[in-house]
Amino acid sequence: MLAELINPYYLQVASFILINIILGVSIYITLSTGQLSLANAGFMGIGAYTSALLTLNFDLPIIGGILAGTLLAGVFGILIGIPTLRLQGVYLAIVTLGFGEVIRVIFVNWESMTKGAVGLSGIPHMGRELLNTLKEFGFDPKILGLQNNQFVFLAIFLILLGVTISIITFFRRQNRSRVGRAFAAIKLDEKAAESMGINITYYKVLAFAQGALVAGFAGALFAHVLAYISPADFAYHRAVEILIFAVFGGSEVIWGPVFGALFLTVMPEVLRFISEYRYMIYGLIIIIMMAVRPQGLIDVNILNWLKLKTSKRRQKHGTSSQKSM
Amino acid sequence: MLIEQLINGITLGSIYAIVALGFTLVFGVLGIINMAHGEIFMFGAFIGVVVTSTFKGPLWLAFMAAILVTAAMGYLLERFALRPLRNKQGVSHLAPLISTIGVSILLENLSHHIFGPGNHPFRASFAEISFQIGSITVYLVQIVIFIISVLLMYALSFWLGKTKAGKALRATAENLETASLLGVDVKRTITMTVIIASAMGGIAGILVGMAFNSVTPQMGLSIGLKGLAIIILGGMGNVKGAMAGGLILGLAETFVVVYGNSGYKDAIAFAAIIVILLIRPQGLFGQKISA
């Protein structure tokens, strides 16, 4: 019964949605200090290539590869962040865009290592490796009534779901902490924040590095879910796609980019005839959103309104359980 | 050999300079980075291909058509992507940047659908004509490109420096509100600036088509990003800086191909801007801005 419900194709799409959500969160973090960084596609590439190369060439377990990729992206985030965060607004956007482009050119040209524009294939697949390990302990997916294939994709989906929920939870909690308040203060007015005693360089680099870390993590996951990566996966279009998650969904609250990533990944899958025009629609969405609703679809007002609605409905039905957004 | 490469570098550099001028005009007046400029430039190149290859028209007609179409695109860009954001309360200063990124994606994919993704050759009737001066070979195309670029730069400098409209533009660039108090029709000046910048992009598009004999939908992105790098190199909003920056980049790229690794050619521009922004954020020729 369970077996018929699990369609590898849907699970695959769901996995990509989750990776895109993580990417959306990564740009949200830097945006929450008012910095627009377009380097996240580059950081994603660093994470993906590091993890893929380590697992391919040095037989590192996948978890080790992902950790190394994530950390290296974070280190690059700090290295790039310290000098570039002296720049503001448009300048920062262009330099980070340039950084992404330099990374891509390096991936294309460092052929002995990255196989150039062809890309790396045969990267250890997260789900299949897990299945093989479990099989050594005498586990067979048939116990659950699943095909091997179904089990693989289900496992990936569940792992990613757990990871995504933990990331969102972490950053929601961080927003309510000292760090989150410092980010918000810097976003509102840097000078005022500085005069209140907030070390703005520290917090801006922190936000930038966190964004890089999360983007690198998403990249490493991407490599082991798709098992194939090429420099084109981390080029300008990816940077823009990540940006659109935040522009469309909104960057004031974390649910904005999450919703943006969800909606914009599902849309071309559901409306097949649209997927050919996908990027044209992306372009139109950006133009219209900027003119009509520059803060994105989901902002604080909408969240409050939703909260009010659900709490009213709850009172009507007489349930006493409290749920916070 | 060296002189030939020098000529190649100057040809490439003068095209880059014209692309960069389009960016610099818009940035000088509006303080906006027009990310769609590269795609407007690419449309200009495609109009050139359509006129010369599909309709077998003469080159001057291709120039006229490209100028008309890209000027119209400039107007639409200003009207629908930039004007709605101006004078609006609570809009982040990044909004116009993001909006023009939207336009660039739209245009790039539109050209995919209209012209197809492949590589389109650009046939100029005099492409093969070359001169021998001593041991040096110079192609007529290179001379034509260079002359057109110089004329265009000269015309722009004259227009900015000597005509009333140019003065209005400079006043607007200096301070939008003061200019409007002094009786400059700011709205018209802004629209005109975007239109002129776009038309220059269209001309540059045809020049690139002639120089490389190939036009693709992706060229807008790569040349556009380089134009962006050049205006940072030369100083944002600085017309002379854009010209010099274009020549520097053109020469640097040519010599990297000759004496170094051609694969890293496309990274030079960005490596350069990262260094420039860290050492001399106002650009090579820019004035120091007090924050």
Image (cartoon, helix red, strand yellow):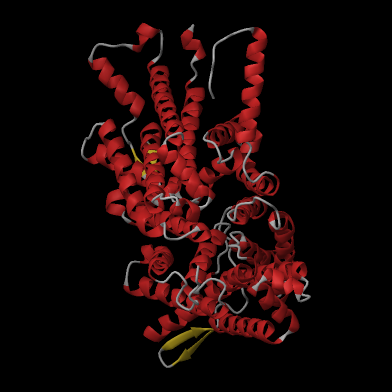
Check the picture and name the quadrant holding the C terminus of chain A.
Answer: top right
| In the image, farthest residue toward the left | A58
Count the labels in the image. Answer: 0
Vertical arrangement, residue B162 with respect to residue A183, above or below: below
The image shows residue B142 at horizontal and vertical percentages of 54, 81
Q: Is residue A75 left or right of residue A279?
A: left
Residue A239 visible to the viewer: no
Return the residue nearer the eye: B5 or B87: B87
Q: Is residue A19 left or right of residue B196?
A: left
The image shows residue A98 at horizontal and vertical percentages of 44, 59
| In the image, farthest residue toward the front | A196
The image shows residue B77 at horizontal and vertical percentages of 70, 59
Vertical arrangement, residue B241 with respect to residue A282, above or below: below
Vertical arrangement, residue A111 with respect to residue A140, above or below: below
The image shows residue B182 at horizontal and vertical percentages of 76, 76
Return the residue nearer the eye: A292 or A47: A292
Q: Is residue B261 left or right of residue A250?
A: left
Residue drawn at 47 percent across, 89 percent down: B132
Residue A173 visible to the viewer: yes
Residue drawn at 66 percent across, 85 percent down: B161
Residue A303, picture quadrant: top right
Q: Is residue A170 left or right of residue B225?
A: left
| In the image, farthest residue toward the bottom | B134
Residue drawn at 37 percent across, 46 percent down: A206
Vertical arrangement, residue A65 with respect to residue A196, above or below: above
Residue B276, picture quadrant: bottom left
Return the residue nearer the eye: B141 or B219: B219
